[in-house]
Every structure is written in structure tokens, then in C-alpha cells.
Image (cartoon, rainbow, N blue to C red):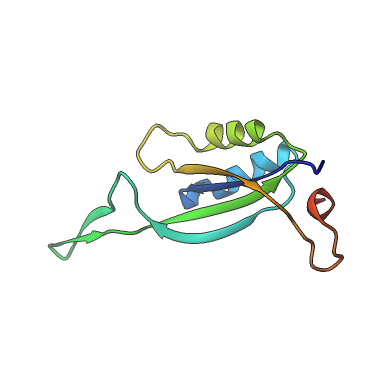
């Protein structure tokens, strides 16, 4: 039976990226993909005033961190991320967890766990 692989997607504030990377590295995460993204959730954007005129920014800049794990427990990754990201304020982010059916390393043809290591 193949080793279970799990994809974890973390969307959070840009200012939290470096502390998150450092904390994940400390628990054995050595690879991730990071995107700059725009979005909104409960906060529905932000209101600003420019030269006396009100305007709204509907999509806020965030970062999305994607990683696939098979040796580090998913709960360890999630708990580490929450401990770094949680401020108690709206906009702390979301974490999505999905099973991964197969992984292939293009350069070598290795699959699944071997492709991740």
C-alpha cells in the first residue's frame, strides 16, 4: 500500500509568511510553493479614504502556501501553522487539507513518497 500523502493549502496575511516558513522548517517541512493571491472572506475588503474620497478595496493581498506531506504528521503542520498565524482578528486565514492520489517527480520519474523526498 502506498504511503498516504496530504496536500495542505494555507492562505494568510503576507506579513506572516516568513514566521510560517521558519516554523514549518523547524518541524521538518523542507519544500513548499508560495503564491501571492488576492481574496476576501468575512472581512469583505477594506474601506480607505484618499484625498477626501472614500473608496473600497474588495480584494486584499494574501499569500497562499501549498505543501504535500507524507512523513510529517498533518496535525503537526496544522497546529504549527495555527500557532504562528492566529491573532484572533478577522483575516488570520484558512487552511485546506486534501488527499493526494499520486505524486511524480518529473526529472527522475520517482513517484509518491520518493518524489517528495
Please identify the quadrant where the N terminus is shown.
Answer: top right
Q: Is residue 98 left or right of residue 108?
A: left
Q: Residue at x 80, y 44 (%)?
A: 2
Q: Position of residue 99 (x, y in %)?
A: 63, 45
Q: Which one is nearer the viewer's eye here, 39 or 107?
A: 107
Q: Is residue 14 left or right of residue 60?
A: right
Q: Position of residue 93 (x, y in %)?
A: 44, 43
Q: Residue at x 65, y 35 (%)?
A: 74
Q: Looking at the image, is 107 positioned above or below residue 24?
A: below
Q: Which one is nearer the viewer's eye here, 1 or 28?
A: 1
Q: Position of residue 28 (x, y in %)?
A: 75, 40
Q: Is residue 7 left or right of residue 38?
A: right
Q: Residue furthest left?
A: 52
Q: Residue at x 46, y 43 (%)?
A: 94
Q: Which one is nearer the viewer's eye here, 56 or 114?
A: 114
Q: Looking at the image, is 41 positioned above or below residue 74?
A: below
Q: Position of residue 95 (x, y in %)?
A: 51, 42
Amino acid at each position: 500500500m502506498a504511503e498516504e500523502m496530504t496536500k495542505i493549502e494555507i492562505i494568510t496575511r503576507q506579513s506572516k509568511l516568513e514566521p510560517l516558513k521558519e516554523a514549518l522548517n523547524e518541524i521538518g517541512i523542507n519544500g513548499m510553493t508560495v503564491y501571492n493571491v488576492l481574496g476576501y472572506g468575512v472581512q469583505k475588503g477594506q474601506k480607505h479614504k484618499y484625498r477626501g474620497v472614500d473608496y473600497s478595496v474588495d480584494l486584499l493581498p494574501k499569500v497562499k502556501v501549498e505543501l504535500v506531506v507524507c512523513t510529517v504528521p498533518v496535525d503537526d503542520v496544522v497546529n504549527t501553522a495555527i500557532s504562528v498565524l492566529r491573532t484572533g482578528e478577522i483575516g488570520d486565514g484558512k487552511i485546506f487539507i486534501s488527499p493526494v492520489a499520486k505524486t511524480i517527480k518529473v526529472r527522475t520519474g520517482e513517484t509518491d513518497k520518493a518524489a517528495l523526498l
